[in-house]
Amino acid sequence: MKGTWMTVHPLHSTKAAYVRRDGRWDDLERLRTSSPMYDATIEEIDGRRIRVGDHWLSDFASCNYLGFDLDPQIMDAVDPYIRTWGTHPSWSRLLGNPKPYIEIEERLTELLGAPDTLLLPTITHIHMSVIPILAGKGMIFLDSQSHKTIYDGCMNAKGLGATVQRFRANDPDHLEELLKAAPAGVTRLVAMDGVNSMTGLAPDIARFAQVCRENNALLYVDEAHGFGVIGERSEHETSPYGSRGNAIVRYAGETYDNIVLVGGFSKSYSSLMAFLALPTWLKNHLKVAAPPYLYSGPSPTASLATVMAGMDVNEQRGDAIRADLYRKTMKVLNHVRALGLYTPNTGTTPIIELPLAQGEDIQEVGQFLWDRGIYVTLAAYPLVPRDQVGFRVQVTAANTDAELDQLNAVLSELASGLRLRDAA
């Protein structure tokens, strides 16, 4: 569909500015203006219940998987940090680092079993700044279903001289073909997700790492949704998620050779902070080459406090929390599967995508969920391809069993009305 042009009169200007309206976003704009689940103002929370206006809903749109956003031990940690460090560090990290930054990096490095770690404000910051540095004028091999922020980072690198090729999602053999066909002597960066933000599935990292090592490529993995949930396997683990929540590399029993892992504290740890697990030499290079380290305002003091306290909670009772999260997730997944509904999540992670039988029903289905007190992430085109339009349920440890029962009952209603896609 061709875009149209609209006139905008900015403040303090007597001249009209012209902004192109892209028709690709029409479906999403209609939802934004008509659905109460888009651009909502949340006025109050009570556990994992939220109030929008005078309407209370059970929240399944949160990514606070471990419930750390509501943990009293973690909340109590904020005030002492602010009294010590103020509300926000006033330096870029290149100029000065409050000591908690260094303490977090040391603890995180041990938790991940990585050679070193570097903290930056957000994963988006990392993708946009670090991918171009790693790729240079070489080649990037991009998973075709990678998150939009990885794609944007790769396009930024392309604009600076890199070449980008896509490989089929979760297909290491196709990646291997492309790597073997690449010119000798060029930098090779493979960029992909860990636990996928929509399907909830984890790729075969061991196989991808093998392909990259055999073809002199660096594997760059975005583990936004896996960090804190999945971790190293052991005979003492409390659930199939593994232990310690130390992310996909350890979950797969892999090393960090030829792997840069990117993760965030904004999901499981409910804190504004992100990180790279990487060699020390690369960490030191990024300190003078990555713009967020040089120029960005750093994470606020409250995030330093909640990350540190979250690490304490993770050590003390994280595996018990993950066991409860697994139980609650399976309560929903088992119900979805018993209803014969299709979800790409064939595993056990707490991300449950439910495509609609008819994508054009998304507005009506969203209203149906709203009316029954269920808040989810609506996935409209072009956020997802048209054949994947639907909604995403995210289970957290803070959701109650009563809320899960409410969700399952509403999913049963949707299934009986043939609104959701059948597994067959």
Image (cartoon, rainbow, N blue to C red):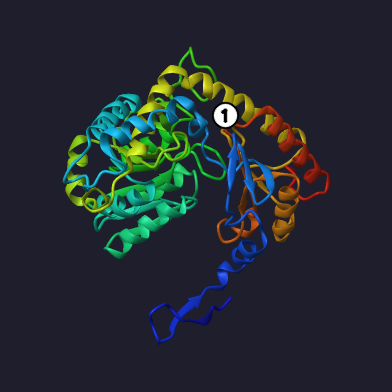
Residue 210 to residue 177: above or below:
above
Residue that extends furthest to the front in the rendered view of this protein:
83
Residue 20 visible in this rendered orientation of the protein: yes
Residue 27, image quadrant: bottom right
The answer to which image quadrant residue 244 occupies is: top left
Quick one: which residue is furthest to the bottom in this view?
Answer: 15
What amino acid type should be assigned to the residue bearing mark 1?
Ala
Note whether residue 352 is visible: no
**The N terminus sits in image quarter:** bottom right
Query: Which residue occupies the extreme top position in the image?
Result: 236
Q: Mark 1 points at which residue?
A: 397
Q: Which residue is drawn at 59% across and 44% down?
A: 44
Q: In this orientation, which residue lies closer to the viewer: 82 or 6? A: 82
Q: Which residue lies furthest to the right in this view?
A: 416
Between residue 238 and residue 257, name the one nearer to us: 238
Neighbour tally class for label 1: few under 14, some 14-19, many 20 plus, Cα within 10 Å: many
- Residue 30 percent coordinates (x, y): 64, 66
Q: Give the left or right position of residue 107, taking residue 192 as reference.
A: left
| Residue 336 picture location, percent across and down | 72, 36
Residue 379 x/y as whole percent: 61, 53
Q: In the rendered picture of this protein, how many numbered marks are placed on residues? A: 1
Looking at the picture, how far across and down is residue 127, in whole percent? 35, 51
State which quarter of the image contains the C terminus: top right
- When the figure is inspected, residue 43 is found, relative to residue 319, above or below; the finding is below
Secondary structure under the numbered disc 1 in the rendered image = loop
Relative height, residue 54 to residue 276 (above, below) = below
Q: Please name whichever residue, 149 or 410, is drawn nearer the observer in this view of the structure.
A: 410
Q: Which residue is drawn at 65% across and 52% down?
A: 53
